[in-house]
C-alpha cells in the first residue's frame, strides 16, 4: 500500500529525476504547505505518495520515469499506458497486483508523463517497443507478464511478437483491429493534433479540469470516473510532448502499422487476453472479437457498461481480471 507496506524495488542503475517530475513534485509540496480543503489535501497527499515512488533510468538515450512495486522475487508484471496518458493512470491498480505477489513495473513512455522528451522524435511502435525491452534488460527481468491499455497495446503486441522469449503473457485493455482508410489516415492526425495540442492542453494549463471531465464522461466513458482521477489524468496533457501526439497519431494511422496488428496476433504463442468495453467508442468491441479470433492462445472478455477509460472507470475489476488471468497462466 501507499503507506509503505509494499516494497519499492531499488534499481541497479539510476538517473537523475527529469525536469518535468521535479517541477510537478515542487508544485504538489507547495500546495500541501498551504491551505486546502480536506478533499484536496487527501488528493495531493496521495499524489505525493505516488511521486515518492518515482525512479529514473536511461533507455536508448532517453531518461524514463518508472515505478517498481511489490516483492522483488515476484513474477514481473509490466504495465504500459496509452496514448497521451501516463503511468499514473494505473495508480488504483498497482497496489492490488503487488498485494497479490507480483513485482509490478509501470513506466512512462518517452515523451509522456515524467519521462523526458525524445529529441529524435522516435515516438513509433517500434521505438516504444525497443524501450520496453531495454527496461526489462536493465532491471534484470526474466520473462514478463505485460498488460497494456489502448496505444500501449500496439507496443506490447509488437514486443510479444518480436521478443517472444521475453514475454510470458499479454493482456490488452481497450484494443482492437483498426482498418486502414486513406482519408482517415490524413484526417485523424490533424484532428488529434488540434484537439489535444491546441484545445485540451491550453485548457489544462488554465486549470479548467472540468472541461476534460465532461468530454470524458460524455464521449469516452460509460461510468463516471472519480474527479480526482480525472484531475490526475489531465496531468498527462501537461506532460506529454506535443511532438509525441503528432508522431504517434500518424504512426497508428499508417497502413503498415495497422495491418501488422493482425499479423502479430497470429504469430504470438503466449496466453493472451483482450478486455473490451462494451461501449468503447474508440476501440470497438466487435473489432476486438475479430482480433482475438486470430490468436492461437487467446481469450476475449467484454465488460458491460464500460467505455474506453476502463482504468479509471472500473479499476477494481481491472485488477481482479488481471489476477484471475495471471493465476491461470501461472497454473
Image (cartoon, grey):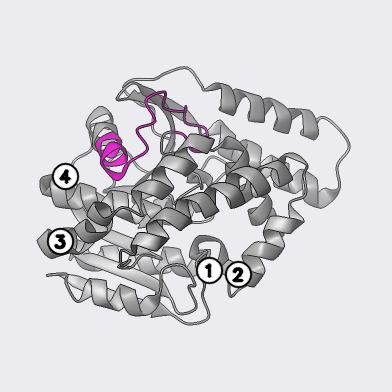
Circle 1 packing at 10 Å, graded few (<14), some (14-19), many (20+), is: some
Cα separation, mark 4 vs mark 1, equals 29 Å
Q: Are marks 3 and 1 in contact (CB under 8 Å)?
A: no
Circle 2 packing at 10 Å, graded few (<14), some (14-19), many (20+), is: some
Whichever of labels 3 and 1 marks the residue nearer the N terminus, that label is 3
Q: Name, please, the residue furthest toward the top.
A: 16
Query: Where residue 88 sits: x, y (%)?
Result: 53, 46
Would you name the residue on which mark 2 appears? 219
Q: Which residues are magenta?
A: 111-132
Q: Nearer the viewer, mark 3 or mark 4?
A: 3
**Marking on residue 276:** none
Does residue 131 show up magenta in the picture? yes
Query: Where residue 36 sits: x, y (%)?
Result: 86, 42
Query: Where residue 41 sits: x, y (%)?
Result: 78, 44
Would you name the residue on which mark 4 appears? 166
Q: Are marks 3 and 4 in contact (CB under 8 Å)?
A: no
Would you name the residue on which mark 1 appears? 314
Front residue of 88/267: it is: 267
Which residue appears at 65% of the width and 71% of the height? 218
Task: Give the secondary structure at mark 1.
Answer: loop
Overall secondary structure of the magenta section:
loop
Cα separation, mark 2 vs mark 3, equals 31 Å
Query: Where residue 71 sits: x, y (%)?
Result: 35, 42
Q: Name, please, the residue furthest toward the bottom.
A: 304
Would residue 133 appear left or right of 41 to someone viewing this image?
left
Whichever of labels 2 and 3 marks the residue nearer the N terminus, that label is 2
Would you name the residue on which mark 3 appears? 263
Q: Is residue 173 above or below residue 90?
A: below
Q: Is residue 188 above or below residue 36?
A: below
Cα separation, mark 2 vs mark 1, equals 16 Å
Amino acid at each position: 500500500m501507499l503507506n509503505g507496506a509494499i516494497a519499492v524495488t531499488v534499481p541497479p542503475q539510476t538517473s537523475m529525476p527529469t525536469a518535468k517530475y521535479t517541477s510537478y513534485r515542487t508544485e504538489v509540496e507547495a500546495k500541501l504547505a498551504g491551505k486546502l480543503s480536506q478533499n484536496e489535501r487527501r488528493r495531493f497527499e496521495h499524489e505525493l505518495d505516488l511521486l515518492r515512488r518515482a525512479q529514473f533510468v536511461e533507455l536508448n538515450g532517453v531518461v524514463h520515469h518508472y515505478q517498481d512495486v511489490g516483492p522483488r522475487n515476484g513474477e514481473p508484471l509490466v504495465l504500459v499506458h496509452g496514448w497521451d496518458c501516463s503511468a499514473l493512470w494505473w495508480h488504483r491498480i498497482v497496489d492490488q497486483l503487488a498485494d497479490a505477489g507480483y513485482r509490478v513495473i509501470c513506466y512512462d513512455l518517452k515523451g509522456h508523463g515524467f519521462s523526458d522528451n525524445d529529441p529524435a522524435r522516435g515516438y513509433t511502435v517500434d521505438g516504444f517497443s525497443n524501450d520496453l525491452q531495454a527496461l526489462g534488460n536493465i532491471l534484470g527481468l526474466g520473462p514478463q507478464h505485460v498488460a497494456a491499455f489502448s496505444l500501449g497495446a500496439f507496443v506490447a503486441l509488437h514486443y510479444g511478437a518480436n521478443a517472444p522469449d521475453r514475454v510470458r503473457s499479454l493482456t490488452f485493455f481497450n484494443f482492437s483491429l483498426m482498418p486502414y482508410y486513406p482519408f482517415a489516415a490524413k484526417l485523424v492526425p490533424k484532428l488529434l493534433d488540434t484537439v489535444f495540442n491546441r484545445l485540451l492542453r491550453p485548457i489544462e494549463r488554465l486549470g479548467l479540469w472540468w472541461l476534460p471531465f465532461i468530454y470524458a464522461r460524455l464521449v469516452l466513458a460509460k461510468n463516471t470516473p472519480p474527479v480526482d482521477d480525472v484531475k490526475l489524468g489531465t496531468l498527462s496533457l501537461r506532460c506529454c510532448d506535443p511532438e509525441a501526439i503528432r508522431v504517434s497519431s500518424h504512426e497508428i494511422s499508417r497502413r503498415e502499422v495497422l495491418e501488422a496488428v493482425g499479423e502479430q496476433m497470429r504469430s504470438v504463442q503466449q496466453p493472451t487476453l483482450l478486455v473490451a468495453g462494451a461501449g468503447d467508442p474508440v476501440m470497438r468491441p466487435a473489432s476486438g472479437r475479430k482480433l482475438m479470433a486470430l490468436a492461437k492462445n487467446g481469450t476475449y472478455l467484454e465488460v458491460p457498461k464500460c467505455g474506453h477509460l476502463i482504468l479509471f472507470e472500473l479499476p477494481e475489476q481491472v485488477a481482479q481480471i488481471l489476477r484471475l488471468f495471471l493465476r491461470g497462466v501461472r497454473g
